[in-house]
Amino acid sequence: MTREQVETEMAQYRTIFTVVRLLDAAQVGETVEQAVSRADKLMYQAKNHKNMVVTEDNARDGALSAAGREGHSRQSILIMDDSEMNRAILAEILGSDYNILEATNGRECLAMLEQYGTGIALILLDIVMPVMDGFAVLSEMNRSHWIEDIPVIMISSEDADTVVRHAYELGVSDYVSRPFDAGVVYRRVFNTIKLYAKQRRLASLVTSQIKEKEKNTKMMISILSEVVEFRNGESGQHVLHIGTLTQRLLERLTQKTDKYDLPPETQELIVMASALHDIGKVAIDDKILNKPGRLTPEEFDLMKTHTVVGANMLDRLGRYKNEALVKTAHDICRWHHERWDGRGYPDGLAGDDIPISAQIVSMADVYDALVSKRVYKAAYSPDTAVQMILHGDCGQFNPLLLECLVDIQDVLKAEIVGRENEEG
């Protein structure tokens, strides 16, 4: 069908629609002369608003008038229907206020989604189409999570309960059966887009508040860890290094294996909690913390208590002690000096009895201690540090983590040692 034929049928459709409405009105008391007069007015409005479907309802209350449509910015709607006539009718209803995109089958629709993404404000979707039907499109939108951000209104002559129910199960926001009322279609489109816009604003607000809360939490942790490092006589960069090392080890470990339950939110908690790994050192005498020579056995025994002291401090946080961040920090504080072979302290845990969070922070702590200058030692080169860890000079570590360390050693060299040299 050519464009000229479509426009001709559209004109006929509008005329018939108007006449039918007028006949309905005449049946409830309107004279023929009054109906003809009102028909003249409606057709005159149609001529002056060629991109607008004029009905008695919108002529009377202005719901679809140009003045009433200026309240929202122009957005894009994707109409997916294999019928050119159906697409033209919907474009006529909506084209004055929305940018109209068209697709004739499911594959074209998905290509449009790939191209425009959330630049599409809403999809009007038919069910029965060639190549790929509407349900297949919805399934793909669910798989790719587009359905979460782009609302879909199904417009179809298929109105069986099972069909409608299946459409809703696949995530459509609304369902309109053909033949449809122009005013109803416009209002449902408008309301659905408005609702999703409100949801996005709310989500943005919540996300902003969460980020602000996380920022404040990180700031307080940084202040507290800085106090610990100041007493310890170490560079304030140590805590930052531990966070970076922990994050890189976590990333590589989750790439190599799914043995450990480490979703992104857990990884973030571990990185944040790593800053508190030595909080128990606030209870250790400065003379022991900053002693330039080797510690005596008695001094070393006192030094080792910082693991239990730190964990006990977190246990005494009352109502906060069961928070995920506090529990993660507790595990790291108490067990970041345990070793894979069971020869660490304070509890002599071995293997995966040691929480993976503590294992990772333990390796990060050892690596940074080796490559950094301390009051009791000079800094080792990154390559030497890695070899010392691999050879067990600093105790035994999880073989998987050793592989991760080897895999990312060049990255660590650039991010930790290289950056420190630039700043120094």
Image (spheres, rainbow, N blue to C red):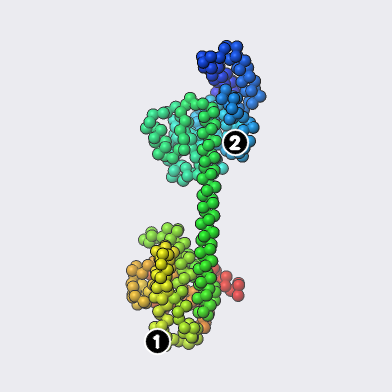
Q: Quadrant of residue 33?
A: top right
Q: How far from the left and from the top, in percent, is residue 119?
A: 56, 42
At label 1, the amino acid type is Glu
Q: Residue at x 66, y 24 (%)?
A: 48
Q: Earlier in the sequence, mark 2 or mark 1?
A: 2
Picture quadrant where residue 312 is located: bottom left
Q: Quadrant of residue 77?
A: top right
Instruction: Farthest residue to the right: give it.
Output: 48
Label drawn at residue 99: 2
* Residue identifier under label 1: 298
Q: Residues within 10 Å of mark 1 (few under 14, many from 20)?
A: few
User: Can you see residue 196?
Assistant: yes
Q: Residue at x 52, y 69 (%)?
A: 222
Disc 2 on helix, strand or loop?
Answer: strand
Above or below, comparing residue 175 to residue 406 in the picture? above
How crowded is the residue under tag 2: few (<14 C-alpha within 10 Å), some, or many (20+)? some
14 vs 231: above or below:
above
Residue 387 in view: no
Identity of the residue drawn at 59% across and 27% down: 61
